[in-house]
Amino acid sequence: MPKLDDTANTRDLGLLVLRLGVGISMAAFHGFGKLQGGPELWERIGANMGTLGLKFFPVFWGFMAMSSEFFGSILLALGLFFRPVAALLAFTMVVAMSRHLSLPPDAENAGWSGASHALELFSVYLALLLIGPGRYVLWRRSR
């Protein structure tokens, strides 16, 4: 067990706790439902890419959102393919924010209050992308 007064160890331990907490909760509470929803749900989710001007292949885009939220979150928790996965998850949150911000003002979850969760997670994923996974990962490339 690392000493808690060692800044490098506490940083790496903190990153592990963050990766596990965010990764497991995103996979369990967001990605798993999308995985179970199948192509019909993926099409509805993928249609949100229309807010960015991409109105083709909604099933593909929904599948990609599900994959990043479920499989990508598991990889993030394990520290595998970390930076590409963090980038994909950050992009997924940009799409979620754009969806909430494009809703009519009287719609449920419209505006910044609806987009706040996606904004928070975008910030977490962007910070993780910049910081890296830390020392405690499932597999580390030798240098």
Image: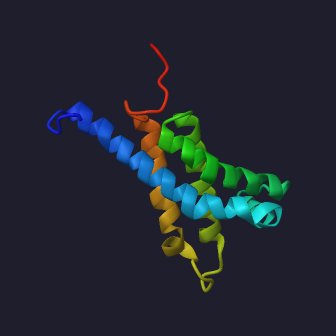
Residue at the location (48% across, 67% down)?
A: 116
**Which of 91 and 42 lies nearest the eye of the viewer?**
42
Q: Is residue 55 above or below residue 1?
A: below
Q: Residue furthest bottom?
A: 106
| Left or right: where 63 falls relative to 96 | right
| Left or right: where 122 falls relative to 11 | right
| Left or right: where 52 falls relative to 143 | right
Q: Position of residue 26 (x, y in %)?
A: 53, 57
Q: Is residue 24 visible?
A: yes
Q: Position of residue 100 (x, y in %)?
A: 60, 70
Q: Is residue 84 above or below residue 55?
A: above
* Colouring method of the image: rainbow
Q: Position of residue 67 (x, y in %)?
A: 68, 49
Q: Quadrant of the C terminus?
A: top left
Residue at the location (50% across, 50% down)?
A: 23
Quadrant in which residue 106 is drawn: bottom right
Q: Residue furthest front?
A: 1
Q: Is residue 47 visible?
A: no
Q: Residue furthest top?
A: 143
Residue at the location (47% across, 15% down)?
A: 142
Residue at the location (53% across, 73% down)?
A: 114
Quadrant in which residue 105 is drawn: bottom right
